[in-house]
Image: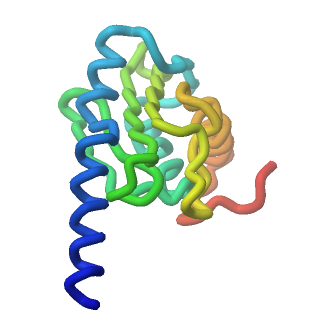
Amino acid sequence: MKNILLLILLSLSLQANAWGFQPKDVINAKQKGDQGIVKVYPVTKAQAWDIAQAVFRWKRSNAVTLHPEENYMLTSIGIITCPCKTEVGVWVEPVDNDNTRVTVVSIARVQRNIFTNVETFPDQTGPDFHKKFEQGVEMVKSGEKLPEYLPSSK
Protein backbone atom coordinates (compact mmCIF):
# COMPACT_ATOMS: atom_id res chain seq x y z
CA MET A 1 0.00 0.00 0.00
CA LYS A 2 2.85 2.39 0.85
CA ASN A 3 4.46 1.71 -2.52
CA ILE A 4 1.24 2.49 -4.37
CA LEU A 5 0.82 5.76 -2.46
CA LEU A 6 4.44 6.68 -3.14
CA LEU A 7 3.98 5.92 -6.84
CA ILE A 8 0.85 8.10 -7.00
CA LEU A 9 2.61 11.01 -5.28
CA LEU A 10 5.62 10.71 -7.56
CA SER A 11 3.36 10.63 -10.60
CA LEU A 12 1.48 13.75 -9.46
CA SER A 13 4.76 15.56 -8.87
CA LEU A 14 6.07 14.70 -12.34
CA GLN A 15 2.77 15.73 -13.94
CA ALA A 16 2.84 19.05 -12.13
CA ASN A 17 6.24 19.79 -13.59
CA ALA A 18 5.17 18.70 -17.06
CA TRP A 19 1.73 20.37 -17.17
CA GLY A 20 2.04 23.29 -14.82
CA PHE A 21 3.35 26.72 -15.54
CA GLN A 22 6.74 27.62 -14.19
CA PRO A 23 8.03 30.91 -12.74
CA LYS A 24 9.93 31.56 -15.99
CA ASP A 25 6.55 31.68 -17.78
CA VAL A 26 5.49 34.59 -15.57
CA ILE A 27 8.79 36.38 -16.22
CA ASN A 28 8.46 35.82 -19.96
CA ALA A 29 4.87 37.13 -19.93
CA LYS A 30 6.03 40.29 -18.13
CA GLN A 31 8.88 40.82 -20.59
CA LYS A 32 6.53 40.41 -23.55
CA GLY A 33 4.10 42.81 -21.91
CA ASP A 34 1.11 40.71 -22.92
CA GLN A 35 -0.27 40.11 -19.44
CA GLY A 36 -0.60 41.82 -16.11
CA ILE A 37 -2.07 44.85 -14.43
CA VAL A 38 0.04 47.89 -13.69
CA LYS A 39 -0.87 50.48 -11.05
CA VAL A 40 1.08 53.31 -9.47
CA TYR A 41 0.75 53.76 -5.71
CA PRO A 42 1.73 56.71 -3.48
CA VAL A 43 4.26 54.68 -1.46
CA THR A 44 8.01 54.26 -1.54
CA LYS A 45 9.60 51.25 -3.16
CA ALA A 46 10.45 49.81 0.28
CA GLN A 47 6.85 50.22 1.45
CA ALA A 48 5.51 48.64 -1.75
CA TRP A 49 7.93 45.74 -1.36
CA ASP A 50 6.66 45.08 2.17
CA ILE A 51 3.01 45.42 1.14
CA ALA A 52 3.44 42.97 -1.75
CA GLN A 53 4.92 40.36 0.60
CA ALA A 54 2.06 40.96 3.05
CA VAL A 55 -0.51 40.41 0.27
CA PHE A 56 1.13 37.08 -0.54
CA ARG A 57 0.85 36.11 3.15
CA TRP A 58 -2.80 37.18 3.18
CA LYS A 59 -3.42 35.09 0.06
CA ARG A 60 -1.68 32.14 1.76
CA SER A 61 0.74 31.76 -1.11
CA ASN A 62 3.52 29.23 -1.26
CA ALA A 63 7.11 30.27 -0.59
CA VAL A 64 8.03 33.64 -2.09
CA THR A 65 11.28 33.99 -4.03
CA LEU A 66 12.62 37.52 -3.68
CA HIS A 67 14.75 39.22 -6.35
CA PRO A 68 15.19 42.75 -4.93
CA GLU A 69 18.08 43.62 -7.24
CA GLU A 70 15.76 43.03 -10.21
CA ASN A 71 12.66 44.52 -8.50
CA TYR A 72 10.48 41.40 -8.54
CA MET A 73 9.22 38.49 -6.46
CA LEU A 74 7.66 35.17 -7.49
CA THR A 75 5.34 32.73 -5.81
CA SER A 76 2.52 30.32 -6.54
CA ILE A 77 -0.88 29.82 -5.01
CA GLY A 78 -2.40 26.38 -4.62
CA ILE A 79 -0.92 22.95 -4.02
CA ILE A 80 2.72 23.06 -5.10
CA THR A 81 2.60 19.71 -6.90
CA CYS A 82 -0.74 20.38 -8.57
CA PRO A 83 -0.69 21.55 -12.19
CA CYS A 84 -3.67 23.80 -11.46
CA LYS A 85 -1.75 26.18 -9.21
CA THR A 86 -1.38 29.84 -10.15
CA GLU A 87 2.12 31.23 -10.77
CA VAL A 88 2.41 34.88 -9.75
CA GLY A 89 5.07 37.54 -10.25
CA VAL A 90 5.03 41.05 -8.81
CA TRP A 91 7.35 43.80 -10.02
CA VAL A 92 7.92 46.77 -7.71
CA GLU A 93 9.58 49.64 -9.58
CA PRO A 94 10.07 53.19 -8.29
CA VAL A 95 8.54 55.98 -10.37
CA ASP A 96 10.08 58.60 -8.07
CA ASN A 97 10.89 58.85 -4.35
CA ASP A 98 7.22 58.77 -3.28
CA ASN A 99 5.47 56.68 -5.97
CA THR A 100 5.93 53.09 -7.03
CA ARG A 101 4.69 51.13 -10.04
CA VAL A 102 3.40 47.67 -9.13
CA THR A 103 2.89 45.13 -11.90
CA VAL A 104 1.17 41.81 -11.23
CA VAL A 105 1.35 38.96 -13.71
CA SER A 106 -0.38 35.69 -12.90
CA ILE A 107 -0.75 32.58 -15.00
CA ALA A 108 -3.12 29.77 -14.13
CA ARG A 109 -4.09 26.67 -16.03
CA VAL A 110 -7.53 26.94 -14.40
CA GLN A 111 -9.21 30.04 -13.02
CA ARG A 112 -10.06 28.48 -9.67
CA ASN A 113 -8.25 25.80 -7.74
CA ILE A 114 -10.97 23.16 -7.50
CA PHE A 115 -8.91 20.80 -5.33
CA THR A 116 -8.36 23.05 -2.33
CA ASN A 117 -10.05 25.79 -0.37
CA VAL A 118 -7.22 28.16 -1.25
CA GLU A 119 -8.56 31.18 -3.11
CA THR A 120 -6.61 31.91 -6.25
CA PHE A 121 -6.63 35.17 -8.14
CA PRO A 122 -9.99 35.50 -9.92
CA ASP A 123 -8.35 35.92 -13.31
CA GLN A 124 -4.92 35.87 -14.83
CA THR A 125 -4.19 39.56 -14.41
CA GLY A 126 -4.32 39.82 -10.64
CA PRO A 127 -7.05 42.40 -9.85
CA ASP A 128 -7.58 40.75 -6.46
CA PHE A 129 -3.90 41.28 -5.66
CA HIS A 130 -4.27 45.01 -6.36
CA LYS A 131 -7.43 45.21 -4.23
CA LYS A 132 -5.56 43.75 -1.27
CA PHE A 133 -2.50 45.86 -2.08
CA GLU A 134 -4.68 48.99 -1.85
CA GLN A 135 -5.77 47.84 1.62
CA GLY A 136 -2.10 47.53 2.54
CA VAL A 137 -1.39 51.03 1.24
CA GLU A 138 -4.22 52.40 3.42
CA MET A 139 -2.74 50.64 6.45
CA VAL A 140 0.77 51.94 5.82
CA LYS A 141 -0.46 55.49 5.14
CA SER A 142 -2.47 55.51 8.38
CA GLY A 143 0.56 54.33 10.35
CA GLU A 144 -0.75 50.81 10.97
CA LYS A 145 1.53 47.83 10.95
CA LEU A 146 0.85 45.26 8.20
CA PRO A 147 -0.81 42.30 9.95
CA GLU A 148 0.17 38.68 9.51
CA TYR A 149 -3.37 37.89 8.38
CA LEU A 150 -5.78 40.25 6.68
CA PRO A 151 -8.74 41.19 8.85
CA SER A 152 -12.20 40.82 7.29
CA SER A 153 -12.50 42.53 3.91
CA LYS A 154 -13.27 46.20 3.80
Q: Is residue 106 above or below residue 59?
A: above
Q: How many marks?
A: 0
Q: Is residue 139 above or below residue 32?
A: below
The answer to whether residue 152 is left or right of residue 100 is right
Q: Residue at x 45, y 47 (%)?
A: 84
Q: Nearer the viewer, residue 39 or 44?
A: 39
Res. 146 visible in picture:
no
Q: Nearer the viewer, residue 59 or 18?
A: 18
Q: Nearer the viewer, residue 94 or 72?
A: 72
Q: Residue at x 28, y 36 (%)?
A: 23
Q: Is residue 135 above or below residue 29?
A: below
Residue placed furthest toward the right: 154
x and y, in percent, of residue 100 in the image: 46, 22
Q: Nearer the viewer, residue 3 or 98?
A: 3
x and y, in percent, of residue 139 in the image: 65, 48
Q: Residue at x 59, y 54 (%)?
A: 114
Q: Which picture quadrant has residue 73?
A: top left
Res. 121 visible in picture:
yes
Q: Which picture quadrant has residue 41?
A: top right
x and y, in percent, of residue 62 in the image: 38, 57
The answer to whether residue 25 is left or right of residue 127 is left
For the rendered model, the colour scheme is rainbow
The answer to whether residue 42 is left or right of residue 151 is left
- Work out which quarter of the rendered image holds the N terminus and state it: bottom left
x and y, in percent, of residue 61 in the image: 45, 55
Q: Is residue 147 above or below residue 153?
A: below
Q: Residue at x 18, y 31 (%)?
A: 69
